Amino acid sequence: MKEQNSIPVGKVARAGRFAGAGVKVGANYVKYFAKKMVNPATERSGLDKANARDIYDALSNLKGSALKMAQMLASDQHLLPAEYVNAFRPSQHKAPPLSGPLIVQVFKKSMGVSPQHLFDTFDAVAVNAASIGQVHKATKNGKNLAVKIQYPGISDTISSDLQLVKPFAVRLLNVKESDVRPYFEEVEAKLKEEADYFQELQGAEKIIQGCSDLPNLVFPTYYPEWSSDRILTMDWIEGIPLVDWAQEEHPQEIRDRIGQAMWDFYDHQMHRLRLLHADPHPGNFLVSPEGRLGVVDFGCTKSVPEDFYYAYFAMLNSENLHDDAAMENTLYGLNILNEASRPEERRFFIDSFRALSGMLRRPFDTTEFDFGDQQKT
C-alpha cells in the first residue's frame, strides 16, 4: 500500500481536498450520463464504484474526522449502495499509512527519543492505519507490543472538518442548523477525546478491569511509561480483524462463541459499568487463534448517566411501549421532547421511538432469534 508523506491540516487545504473530490464525482456523473445516452442499458454500479473510489481516496488522504465518517458509513450495510460500503471498508484498519520517516519524527517529538531508542525493535512500516493514528509493531524486554502513533496535527482539524460537513448534513436531513448543533457538538467532543491518548488509556483500563472476568474476551495490557498524549503502547494481540474473519468460513460453534462474547461485552458495560466502548466498528475487534474476541481500540468511551439509563430502558418495557402518555413522559425525560414541541412533533417521536423500541425488544420476545434473518430485522 502506498504511503503518504504528509497530511493537509490547514482549513483551506482540507476544504480544497473536499472540493476536489466533488469535482471528480461531477465528472463521473458526466461520463455516466454520456454512456447512458449511447447505451440505455448501462448500469449505475459503475458510477457508484467510481464515486466511492474518489470519495474514499479524498477521505483517506485527509485522515481524522473525515476518514472517521467513512468508518461509520462502512459499518452500516443498508445506508449506502454496496459499492460505497465495500470501498469504505478499508478505512476501519487498512487506510493508507504515513511514511516511516515522518512517523518517527512524530514519535520523537512526543516522547523525546526515537522509537528505535526506546524499544528493542521497532518496525517503521505500519501494520494498521485508521482515522486518528496508525499502529506499528515493536518489542521491549521480551514483550511483543503494538505502538499507536497519532497523525501529526490531526487533532487540530476536527472542528474545521465538522464545520465543512455540517451544511451537507443540514441539507441531507432537511433540518435546521440549530437542530443538528447538539449532535455535532457531541461528535466534536468525542473526537477530541479520541485524539487524547492519555484519556484513551484511562478509559481502556476502566473497561478492561470491569470486564476482566467475562469469558472468551482478550484485552491488551497498556504501558503508561511508554505512552504520551500522542503515543499509546500496549500488548500486541495476535488475531484476524473481525471484519476479515467474518468473511471466512468458520464452524458455527466458533461464530456463536464470538457473537456471544460481543453480546456479553456490551451487555456488561451498559448494565453493570455504565461505561461503553463507544466505537464498535469491526476494525476495533479481532479474533484470536484460540477463538476469543480481542478488543484492541478504546479511543472512544462513553459514560451512561443513571437518569438516562433508566429513562431509556423504560421505553423497552412492554407496558410503556403502547402507552402514549408513558412514552411521552420518557421522551421529555430524555430531552427529545420539550415544552416547545408541537403536537405533530410529539406524535412523530412517540411513533418513531415506539417502532425503534419494538425492534430492540424482538430478541427478548422469542426463545430464539436469528440476527441474520433479513425478514426479522
Image: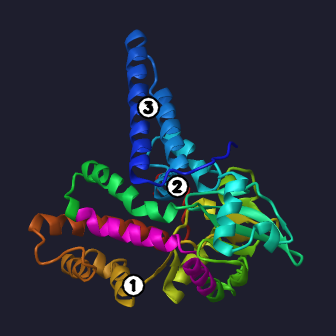
Residue 183, image quadrant? bottom left
Q: In which quadrant is the N terminus drawn? A: top right
128 to the left or right of 362: right
Image coordinates of residue 189 in percent, x first then y, are 41, 72
Residue for point 55% across, 51% down: 7
Q: Which residues are magenta?
A: 179-206
Residue 343 visible in the picture: yes
Q: Which residue is the site of mark 3?
A: 24
Image coordinates of residue 236 in percent, x first then y, are 77, 70
- Residue 202 included in the magenta stretch of the image: yes
Residue for point 63% across, 85% down: 205
Q: In which quadrant is the C terminus drawn? A: bottom left
Residue 340, image quadrant? bottom left
Determine whether the residue tagged by mark 1 lies in a helix, strand or loop. helix
Q: Which residue is the site of mark 2?
A: 71
Image coordinates of residue 133 in percent, x first then y, are 61, 62
Disc 3 and disc 1: Cα gap in Å? 45 Å
Which amino acid type corresponds to the residue marked 3 in the rendered image?
A: Lys
Q: Which mark is residue 309?
A: 1
